[in-house]
Amino acid sequence: MTSISRRGLLRTGAAAGVLAATGLPIRAQQAKRGGRLVVGLSGANTSDSWDGRTHSDVFIISAAQGAVFDSLTEVAADGSLVGELATDWEASSDAKTWTFNLRQGVTFHNGKPFGADDVIESLQLHVAEGSKSAAAPLVEPIAEMKKLGEHQVQFVLNAGNADFPYLMSDYHLLIYPAGQIEEAIAQGIGTGLYRNVSLDPGVRWVGERVESHYKDGEFGWFDEIEFIAINDNTARMNALLTGQVDAINRIDFKTEQLLRANPAVRIQEVTGNQHYTFPMLTNIAPFDDVNVRKALKHGINRQEMLEKVLFGHGQIAADSPIGPANQYMAELDPIPYDPDQAKYYLQQAGLDSIDVNLSASSAAFEGAVDAAQLYQASASAGGININVVQEPADGYWSNVWIKKPWCACYWSGRATEDWMFSSAYQEGVAWNDSQWDSEDNERFQNLLVEARATLEPALRREMYGEMQQILRDEGGVVIPMFANWVQAVSNKVATPDTIGNLWQMDNSRLAERWWMA
Amino acid sequence: MSNVLRIILQRLALGLLTLFVVSVVIFAAVNLLPGDFAQVILGQGATPQAVESIRRDLGLDQPVVLRYFDWLGGALTGDLGTSFAQANFASFVGEGAARGTTVMQQIAPRFANTMFLAGVTALIAVPFAVGLGILAALYRNTAFDKGANVFALTSISSPEFFLAYVLILFLAVLNPILPSLSNIYAGMGLGERLERTLLPALTLTLVVTAHMMRMTRAAIINLLASPYIEMARLKGMSPMRVIVKHALPNALAPIINVIAINLAYLITGVVVVEVVFVYPGIGQLFVDSVKIRDIPVVQACCLIFAAAYILLNLVADILSILSNPRLRHPK
């Protein structure tokens, strides 16, 4: 691999941003303006609003970041980072000071021109007194936000973070007009391609294309967008099959064949970072013994679980949470199913056989109880007697997860390695569901901090590779598989060759990226 | 007539008592469910601090009894409170930005939609069921009567969602006549609204027809042995005329009763149908609210359901009194 210098990387990043702003993407030549896109989406709530701090599900994210609002940066469909309201950015050598140049000539839907104040005020929302923003951990490390000019802001971080521009693409971090934020939240006033026409929370959203936009000729082909909240799986499928909607998210695998048999629709499937896990508390016996953990990892039949729980809609994982939508996913060999090895590691731990409880519920992921039972069956050959404890779905995350020594869980993954690791694998963080700390592996924790402030991509790849290897070999989380994002689209709608895999529905940016065929 | 008035007042008083009992039961039941609003809304992110801060903001840290009387006090003065979801949202953005959506404001449009669906269904189902019942009585013990019975009993015995899917299959998928999505919204024309509402209305019609039709048929046949019917027949009246002019008015009381109960069902029992057809009615709101333990909304919905039953039963009783001269003019 050719080495890329820090400045070189930044320049490419900036170049990509400029290219995205001016040039034409590969498929755009065939794309054309016009039409009304109607989409049936699950994940709508009666509490949905235009407040980015509360966003957590696909319906409102697709409407907010996907259509009405913009963020500073954006993860393109191919996984690269491009500028959205920022055109380019540069870091100091310790990755502590970041300077962003903002796009000029952008206006909000109410006519207010966009500038540095909007960025600063919008980000401060997340760390305001009493705010419960889910994105607070992303904004808190910013020690200082400085307005260098009308279209330039500088962020000084508490500690170096090479991924900072990536974090700014988070769907919570929407840019609102300064001084009018309350109004903007009430009415949905952003800088996006689509103006909010009406939002009926938990029911429907309608948007119309703004007349001119900085993404013209590149994105935003529809004249109008309508999202309909359809939480029921069958109703969603029916709506697509009867042509009332043009696309739906979350296909029910059990009835997928019906969709495949219909020539008027096609199924879109991408593997992203969403993964199903079985975290064990590494500070509690018997999971504090690395040999027991190794034995358990040899006792799971990943291929069988992928086929029976996900109906093949996924990819085998190697006990590392870093997935195909990350930059530095390591090529690890998943630990094979091998009862003899499981027995061997149990002997290393001084045991002939072991009895453990595994808590599971459909709240963890669909089919979690089935997965636990499959695990039970496969592990018994290796002297591991798993007792599957079926927990109630209600209160699962409060009463079972991180409370019971071993349970089923899922993670939707994170855009960057550091973000994922510092959410669930850093010593002492709230969601560290395996209680993974420096007593388990000091090297991992040191690398985590070191890699965060390292800008050199080759070095980072090496460090993150080593961390993933450590998790595979010794980690307290069994990660058997990545689950695909599976959605269906009518042939009336055309989609680019590359579909984003960070999050469902083309990273929730279907309104922007798709067009009428 | 004062007699009727007294009954109405009595029933209304009893109804209020029933509503009170219902509210106690619902409040207790929702509190018995595992997990509360804070835990459910935070999901995987339910750290003790976050749960605690939401509970504090919403007053969920107060004892249950105290919270109930708080709510009751509000409800008695006509304030059903603010839904937890909205209150939680308000605590995010500060009181100023939250538009203070109350439970009433949240429920009103949904309730109007449910009433619209119930109305359309009633317009189809009541004439259909009563007509079918009359015809079944007229042609009793014929192939038509048996066919109508089998049809009605089959449809009432099938679960609603199954009927819904059968109708979707035949009327939306195989023969695309009607839309399978009933997402009506404000500002939609009446014609389109009716078209979208038709499939759920037909499903509900199938569910409620059997009860009303069988009662109509039974009540009429019951009377056919009476001497005055025989007299009418001896006068040489056509069988249809005998039934409609002479038997039906006297059979009205039980029929009205059954119709009222079924109308109440149309308001309260439409949850499944609304979910299958994505109809934005109160049933869907109710399900969403139970899921997140949003007690103020659940309470309000339950009160509406209970009130619908009480009022429609009252109406049924009054109408059956009015339709019965013996009750209307007691000696």
Image: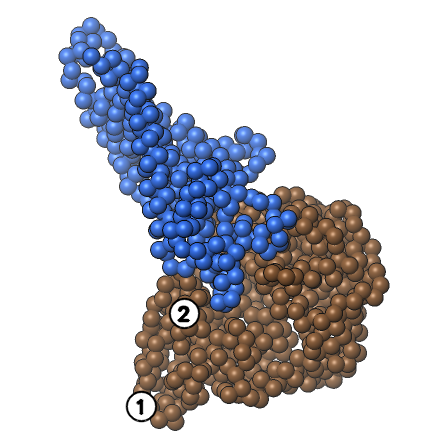
Chain colours: A brown, B blue
In the image, residue B75 sits, relative to residue A490, either above or below, namely: above
Q: Is residue B64 left or right of residue B49?
A: left
In percent of the image, x 25 and y 29: which residue is there?
B214
Q: Nearer the viewer, residue A10 or A113?
A: A113
Which residue has dot 1 on it?
Answer: A352
The quarter of the rendered structure image containing the N terminus of chain B is: top left
From the image, state whether disc 2 or disc 1 is nearer to you.
2
In the image, residue A190 sits, relative to residue B219, either above or below, namely: below
In percent of width and height, residue A484 lies at: 52, 66
As drawn, the label of residue A400 is 2
Q: Is residue B158 left or right of residue A413?
A: left
In percent of the image, x 33 and y 25: which residue is there?
B9
User: Please, what secondary structure does the residue beneath circle 2 have?
Assistant: loop
**Amino acid type assigned to the residue bearing label 1 in the image:** Asp
As drawn, the label of residue B330 is none
Q: Is residue A191 left or right of residue B273?
A: right
In percent of the image, x 61 and y 60: which residue is there?
A131
The quarter of the rendered structure image containing the C terminus of chain B is: top left
User: Please, what secondary structure does the residue beneath circle 1 have?
Assistant: loop
Q: Are marks 2 and 1 in contact (CB under 8 Å)?
A: no
Q: Chain of mark 2?
A: A
In percent of width and height, residue B146 lies at: 23, 30
Q: Nearer the viewer, residue A28 or A478?
A: A478
In percent of width and height, residue B136 lies at: 25, 25
In percent of width and height, residue A182 lies at: 67, 50
